Image (cartoon, rainbow, N blue to C red):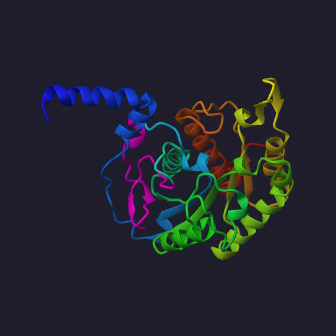
Amino acid sequence: MKPTRLFLLNLLLLALLPAAGLRAQVLKPRLRQVVMPPARKEKFQLYLLIGQSNMAGRGAVEAPDTVPNRHVLRLNPAGQWEVAQDPIHFDKTIAGVGPGLTFGRLMAAADTSLTIGLIPCAVGGSGIDVWMPGAYFADTKTHPYDDALARAKTALQTGTLAGIIWHQGESDSSPEKSALYQQKLKILIKKLREDLQAPNVPFVAGQLPAFQLNKTSPDGRPQINDSAVRINEAVAGLQKQVPNYAFVTAEGTADIGDHTHFNAVSARLMGQRYAAAMQRLQHPARRRP
């Protein structure tokens, strides 16, 4: 192809692709480094990352999100350990920056003698009903619970489960579904702990952000999404019902412009909150009075 035609073609592609999306695609790592995990299982602390798209991540990938840290690994789709870089998840081609990598980096920084293994299993668009044994999610042709359990068991061959983080609820923000959400999440936590033979593993859940709580009515007036508020109340209320459980707020976060997904800055902020809550559960003696 002649240089002039190639130049014009590139200009056309740039015009057709949103700037943020193009930047994210360019920065996504094309090559990932597969590595061996630590020889001692107790030195390889594993974390299961589950939920829907705001756990998987939809923020634009930037240069710091691709900086490798050999103390933070992720289980790739083939069941191999590799140095973690965003996007951590692979549920959909639009996967981007979520809370997982920041969470993993902070957990690694808290104890440099450990290596952190992230097990990404979130599925965009998945309601809590498909996070039950045997449930099928047609949108991605997957079995979210069964797939997460299988991947976790693969990871447990080389490491020790240290915690679970969960961000979900957007798909259950309707009057009927939100009314049952707390009980279903309680059952899910119990089932995961049983199936992973980890009855006391810390579990941290995230609340929905303000941009999902505040909606616009058909006539253009602002209104509160009562169902989303009920989801957040359910997530917070479980702290009094479930042992070794904590929740984090999504206060002060912003979306990517779709009123649904965290932008990259907010996803990283959520990762910080997940790490702080996880560390408080793991080291209760360090909590402030």
Residue 162, located in which quarter of the rendered image? Answer: bottom right
**Residue 12 drawn above or below residue 174:** above
Whether residue 12 is visible = yes
**Residue 65 drawn above or below residue 15:** below
Describe residue 159's horizontal placement relative to residue 183 as left or right.
left
**In the image, what residue occupies the spot 20% across and 31% down?**
6
* Residue 73 image point, x, y percent: 43, 57
Q: Quadrant of the N terminus?
A: top left
**In the image, what residue occupies the spot 66% across and 75% down?**
195
* Residue 96 image point, x, y percent: 48, 44
Of residue 70 and residue 59, the one placed in the foreground of this image is: 59
- Which region is colored magenta? 63-91
**Residue 271 drawn above or below residue 120:** above
Magenta residues, dominant SS class: loop
Q: Quadrant of the C terminus?
A: top right
**Residue 276 drawn above or below residue 198:** above
Of residue 2 and residue 61, the one placed in the foreground of this image is: 2
Is residue 237 found inside the magenta-colored segment of the image? no
